[in-house]
Amino acid sequence: MAFRNPRQTRERLVITAFEEIHAHGFQGLRVDEVLRRSGLQKGAFYHHFGSKTELGYAVLEEQIRPLLESLWLKPLAEIQDPIEEFPRLLDELAERMPRAMLEHGCPLNNLAQEMASQDEGFRERIVRIFDRWIDGLAAMFEAARRNGKVRDDIDSRAVARFLIAAIEGCIGVFKVEHAPEQWVACRSGIQAYLDTLRPETN
């Protein structure tokens, strides 16, 4: 299969690399396998990327960051009452996420654990993506705080950081166990935490 359009060639390389990294990790990524699956030659790879690491950076920026925006940032921007609506977003997550995430877990967290301590370029990019997620959650809670939907004394950014840690932990354990009751337990725990953020009623 020959790809003569440079943009399409690059996109195919990045998409295939994302699939391989998600399944096998960055250190398990083999450029030869990406080329085989893409139907491309080494010349096509080196036309677009100087190294395997550059390809990994592109996967973070062009596949994982947009996935985060689709799964989390866009839906978060529509939530007005986090205590009532955020748990429903969690309930819908399995239907909205790519099937591969049910088997392989969160690609962002996988790379964070594998590469953040190994390569500064990976670490910086992973931090930026997590920061976007934190920003989206914090903005949701800050708007809810102003509108009286959550307690006025909450630290929106601290709440956002805690929820991301909880969600990523839940997804990680589910990846290992593939047990629906694990996700149910996590969802219930997150709901119980959110209930503590309700405004006090007189």
Image (tube, helix red, strand yellow):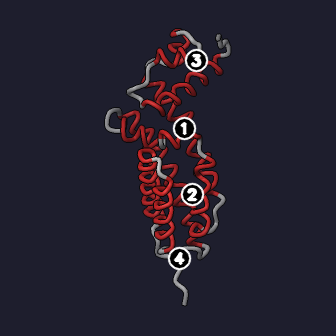
Q: CA distance from mark 4 to mark 3?
A: 51 Å
Of the image marks 2 and 1, the number of the one nearer the N terminus: 2
Where residue 64 appears, x then y in whole percent?
53, 38
User: Which residue in the structure is indicated by mark 1?
Assistant: 100
Q: What SS does tag 1 mark? A: helix
Q: CA distance from mark 3 to mark 1?
A: 19 Å
Q: In the image, which disc is placed on residue 198?
A: 4
Q: CA distance from mark 2 to mark 1?
A: 17 Å
Q: In the image, which disc is placed on residue 90?
A: 2
* Label 3 Cα crowd, 10 Å radius (few <14 / some 14-19 / many 20+): some
In the displayed structure image, the side of residue 183 where residue 112 appears, left or right: left
Of the image marks 4 and 1, the number of the one nearer the N terminus: 1
Where residue 34 appears, x then y in whole percent?
51, 19
Of the image marks 3 and 1, the number of the one nearer the N terminus: 3
* Amino acid at pointer 3: Ser
User: Which residue in the structure is indicated by mark 3?
Assistant: 38
Residue under the point 44% across and 51% down = 168
* Amino acid at pointer 4: Arg
In the displayed structure image, the side of residue 82 where residue 23 appears, left or right: left
Residue under the point 40% across and 41% down = 112
Q: CA distance from mark 4 to mark 1?
A: 35 Å
Where residue 19 appears, x then y in whole percent?
53, 30
Q: What SS does tag 3 mark? A: helix
Which one is in front, 185 or 46?
185
Residue under the point 47% across and 43% down = 105
Which numbered mark, 4 or 3, is in the foreground of this view? Answer: 3
